[in-house]
């Protein structure tokens, strides 16, 4: 299908004309955001209760920063560094089944790198690959979904970390690419729900093993467009009697946490 270049050109011209005005508006919002942070930085308990109230009564899908103990603008010095220790990072990939190919299969690949501090040896890598084919591609409701295969990838990343941490020089710090929470197939039904339950148990065993080894476990999310703190500040600025309008209340839309 062809593109209406004339129409797009008109819109691009309009975009350029409004660019300065848009940037001025963003600058004003960023200044307001910083003022809100300073204003509510010490209101940790009150903000926590407010967020919990919004999530339970007005917006069950709310995702924002949740204050715990420290002030919102708290600055914490780094702890002293250890001369020894090991960092293990895992990341996975997958090939989803495709029934249009001559051979239908799925593949999950989990790779890890082990970097030891205080030694002269080079970083080591490990790869764990698993092929799915024939009956393994199916559940009672049909072919395995992309979400279930992604789930196997996520669990594979966690289990390989627990395996590698056993022989690592403590203290051990493990990283996965993405959040700690398992997302894939979380809302699956039928046999998919049972697969998710078993995968979650396997994941918890890996976390338990890491805990027994006193390994620090973390997930790394690189999301420069995140606005979790911004959303918290929006809720902080919303009067208690107007919380029912929280879903449509976005006075800082366009701002990001990195602006702070």
Image (spheres, rainbow, N blue to C red):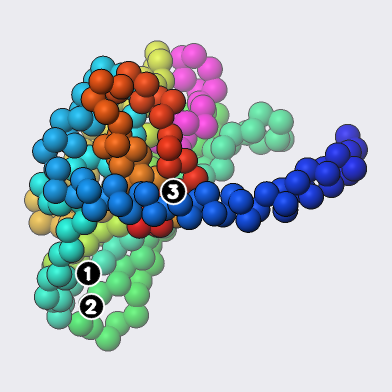
Q: Is residue 225 visible?
A: no
Indicate left or right for 138 with 220 as reference. right
User: Disc 1, disc 2: CB below 8 Å?
Assistant: yes
Q: CA distance from mark 3 to mark 1?
A: 43 Å
- What residue is disc 2 on? 117
User: Disc 3, disc 2: CB below 8 Å?
Assistant: no
Residue 223: image x %, image y %?
43, 52
Q: CA distance from mark 1 to mark 2?
A: 6 Å
Could you say which disc has been placed on residue 107 in the image? none
Residue 72: image x %, image y %?
20, 51
Could you say which disc has been placed on residue 86 in the image? 1
Say what secondary structure mark 3 lies in: helix
Above or below, 121 against 260 in this view is: below
Mark 3 surroundings: few (<14), some (14-19) or many (≥20) residues within 10 A: some
Which circle, 3 or 1, is nearer the viewer? 3
Say what secondary structure mark 2 lies in: strand
């Amino acid at each position: 299908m062809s593109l209406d270049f004339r129409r797009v050109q008109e819109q691009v011209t309009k975009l350029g004309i409004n660019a300065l005005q848009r940037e001025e508006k963003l600058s004003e919002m960023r200044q307001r955001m910083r003022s809100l942070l300073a204003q509510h930085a010490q209101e940790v308990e009150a903000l926590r209760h407010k967020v919990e109230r919004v999530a339970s009564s007005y917006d069950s899908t709310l995702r924002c920063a949740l204050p715990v103990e420290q002030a919102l603008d708290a600055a914490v010095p780094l702890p002293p560094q250890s001369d020894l220790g090991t960092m293990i990072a895992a990341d996975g990939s997958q090939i989803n089944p495709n029934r249009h190919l001559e051979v239908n299969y799925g593949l999950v690949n989990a790779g890890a790198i082990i970097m030891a501090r205080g030694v002269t040896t080079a970083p080591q890598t490990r790869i764990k690959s698993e092929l799915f084919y024939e009956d393994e591609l199916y559940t009672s409701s049909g072919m395995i979904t992309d979400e279930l295969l992604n789930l196997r990838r996520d669990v594979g990343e966690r289990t390989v970390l627990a395996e590698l941490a056993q022989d690592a020089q403590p203290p051990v710090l493990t990283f996965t690419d993405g959040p700690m929470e398992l997302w894939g197939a979380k809302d699956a039904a039928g046999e998919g729900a049972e697969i998710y339950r078993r995968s979650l148990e396997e994941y918890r065993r890996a976390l338990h093993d890491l805990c027994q080894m006193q390994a620090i476990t973390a997930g790394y999310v690189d999301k420069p467009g995140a606005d979790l703190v911004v959303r918290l500040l929006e809720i902080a600025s919303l009067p208690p009697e107007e919380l029912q309008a929280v879903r449509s209340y976005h006075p800082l839309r366009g701002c990001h946490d990195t602006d702070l």
